[in-house]
Amino acid sequence: MNFDTRLIPYGRESVRDAAELLEHGELVAIPTETVYGLAADALNENAVKKIFLAKGRPQDNPLIVHISSMKMLSPLVREIPDTAKVLAERFWGGPLTMIFPKSDKIPSVTSGGLDTVAVRMPASEAAREIIRKCGFPLAAPSANLSGKPSPTTARHVFEDMNGRIPLIIDGGECAVGVESTVICFKGDKIHILRPGGITAEMLSQFCEVEVDKAVTAQPEKDERVLSPGMKYKHYSPKADVYVVNAHGKAFEEYCTKRSRYENKLIALGAGVSEHGVFLDYGSTPEIQAQRLFALLRRVDDLGAKTVLVEMPEQSGMGLAVYNRLLRAAGFKIIKMGDSK
Ligand code: TXA
Ligand code: MG
């Protein structure tokens, strides 16, 4: 793990370089529409092992396998439920990950020892072009060090992966900004394990949808969760993050009061005008999703000790924002009337 990490823009030559490295079992960070991914040949056990090493990721946390066409799906899975076909037709390429029973082609390192595999077809042209050029599926978790906020720019990837991987492809800022929606199938119903760009409301136009309780609740210690990623602390800046259950003026007054006796406090308000300790994290859930991870990195750069975040909406894209914020905050919510 001692590379001169190259960061080059997406283009014909960089796609060729990326494919060549990936064919040789190396790692390449690639842009997607959600967040940057740390890619390896999903079918090459040794290559996939390097992902866990570079990220410092627990080995029981399975990876998402990325494909560029429907043709690539069937060899990877034992069964494709009818609902999956409908959802693929409507939402692929896009930020939707579906969990299937895995075929023997998927090595156990890729699936974290599970007998299922998570698959998604990204919307990002850059990601699809790289997969097409490789001709094999790419396993790719978010390209951050484990526990840090997911990267939404190539610069974020460089901060975390410099020296650990040979190549980062710069495809600009990610359009969605939070990771894909992860679902599994339960008979005719689907179960959302991680909310993302394809919302519960969008999915419920096609089938019955359940949201896993771990999306908004803290799993008990040692509780078995359906998606191993849910049990780890995530997206955390060094600062202590709190979600404040107040809006608008009430939120601003609370933060202003606390900032009088607390040093190094930053408040992220939904659509606030930026002044004093206040930064704007966006007035709609879509903008909040785009900005959230970059802001969580920025508060660290600013040396914040405490970060107070205005409670987001909890429907539509808001559920994805709320889910990531809860994890960044270690589930600490301040209700008005609390002293802290
Ligand atoms: O948007 C995304 O999904 C990004 C980009 C790069 O595609 N990738 C991403 O991967 O977020 P990662 O590894 O950071 O998150 C994958 C999540 C984890 O929570 C993991 O536990 C869950 O998906 N997962 C993967 N395979 C699974 C499986 N077979 N069963 C249950 N959960 C699974
Ligand atoms: Mg991740």
Image (cartoon, grey):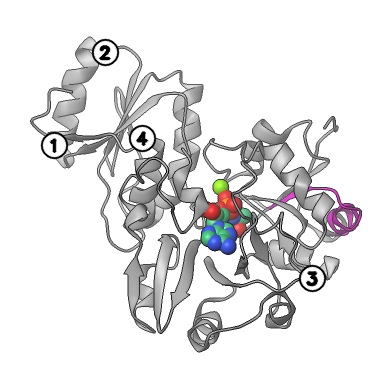
Label number found at residue 196: none
Which residue position holds label 3?
Answer: 132
Quadrant of res 242: top left
Instruction: Give the structural element (helix, strand or loop) at label 4.
Output: loop
Instruction: Give the structural element (helix, strand or loop) at label 1.
Output: helix
Instruction: Give the structural element (helix, strand or loop) at label 3.
Output: helix
Q: Earlier in the sequence, mark 1 or mark 3?
A: 3
The type of residue carrying mark 2 is Glu
| Residue 151 image offset from top left, x and y in percent | 58, 43
Which residue position holds label 1?
Answer: 249
Residue 157 in the image: above or below residue 299: below
Question: Does residue 29 belong to the magenta stretch?
Answer: yes
Which residue position holds label 2?
Answer: 262
Label 2 CB, ligand 2: below 8 Å?
A: no
The part of the chain drawn in magenta is: 16-30
Q: In percent of the image, x 66 and y 39: which residue is there?
A: 157
Q: Depth check: give the residue in front, 339 or 288.
A: 339
Label 3 CB, ligand 1: below 8 Å?
A: no
Mark 1 or 3, which is nearer the eye?
A: 3
The type of residue carrying mark 4 is Ala
Ligand 1 quadrant assignment: bottom right
Which residue position holds label 4?
Answer: 329
